[in-house]
Image (cartoon, rainbow, N blue to C red):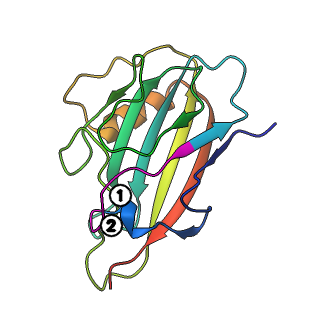
């Protein structure tokens, strides 16, 4: 069975509803996954905008998600339970911050990436950013699933 990440809020490659942007309610869309490898010991998630004017911009980082989890509910600043932790996004916030591309910059892609890890916990300092967390997660990834949504501010 393939490792799949999905959302009830939008389909892969489709627009993210404004509710989940910084122009709306700025809450994270609900996410769910299936098909994680049997030897998964935790999960890590990052949301990246590779179309940002100054290079990839990270909107959310969550790590140490327990292996028995298969979803993250619609939320902004509620930790998903257990040992899960947020790290600082590129806005400097330890929470989800949704899409907010510059006006007239065109459609941006928002890549939700989930890694199944071979460790229970990543040792990440509290002030570490999403980029550093995702780099550390990459050292322990045994599988990865992704979901891409789009958003444009005209």
Residue located 24% across and 22% down the image: 125
For the N terminus, the quadrant is top right
Q: Which residue occupies 46% across, 29% down?
A: 137
Q: Are marks 2 and 1 in contact (CB under 8 Å)?
A: yes
Residue at disc 2, secondary structure? loop
Density class for disc 1 (Cα within 10 Å; few <14, some 14-19, many ≥20) is few
Q: Name the dominant secondary structure of the magenta segment.
A: loop
Residue 107 shown left or right of residue 118 in the figure:
left
- 63 horizontally vs 129: left or right: right
- Residue drawn where x is 58% and y is 52% of the image: 7
Residue 30: within the magenta?
Answer: yes
Rounded to the nearest whole Å, what is the CA distance between mark 2 and mark 1?
A: 6 Å
Q: Residue furthest top?
A: 120
Q: Position of residue 5 (x, y in %)?
A: 62, 45
Residue at image point 77% right, 40% down:
2
Q: Position of residue 79 (x, y in %)?
A: 35, 30
When asked about the image quadrant of residue 148, the answer is: bottom right
Q: Residue furthest right?
A: 1
In the image, residue 31 sits, relative to residue 122, either above or below, namely below
The residue that disc 1 covers is: 56
Residue 68 on image: x %, y %: 59, 20
Quadrant containing the C terminus is bottom left
Q: Which residues are magenta?
A: 22-31
Front residue of this view, candidates 2 and 123: 2
Residue at the disc numbered 2 = 52
Residue 133 in which image quadrant: top left
Magenta stretch contains residue 134? no
Q: Is residue 149 above or below residue 130?
A: below
Secondary structure of residue under mark 1: loop
**Left or right of 97: which side holds 4?**
right
Residue 23 x, y percent position in the rendering: 27, 68
Sort mark 2 into few (<14), some (14-19) or many (20+) by Cα contacts within 10 Å.
Answer: some
């Amino acid at each position: 069975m393939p490792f799949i990440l999905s959302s009830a809020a939008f389909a892969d490659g489709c627009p993210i509803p404004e509710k989940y942007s910084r122009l709306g309610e700025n809450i994270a869309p609900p996410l769910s996954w299936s098909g994680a490898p049997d030897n998964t010991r935790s999960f890590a998630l990052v949301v990246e905008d590779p179309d940002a004017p100054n290079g990839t911009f990270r909107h959310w980082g969550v790590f140490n998600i327990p292996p028995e989890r298969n979803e993250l509910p619609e939320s902004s600043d509620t930790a998903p339970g257990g040992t899960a932790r947020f790290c600082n996004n590129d806005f400097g916030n330890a929470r989800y911050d949704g899409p907010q591309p510059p006006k007239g910059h065109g459609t941006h892609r928002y890549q939700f990436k989930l890694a199944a890890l071979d460790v229970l916990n990543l040792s990440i300092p509290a002030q570490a950013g999403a980029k550093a967390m995702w780099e550390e997660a990459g050292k322990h990834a045994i599988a990865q699933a992704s979901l891409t949504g789009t958003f444009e501010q005209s």
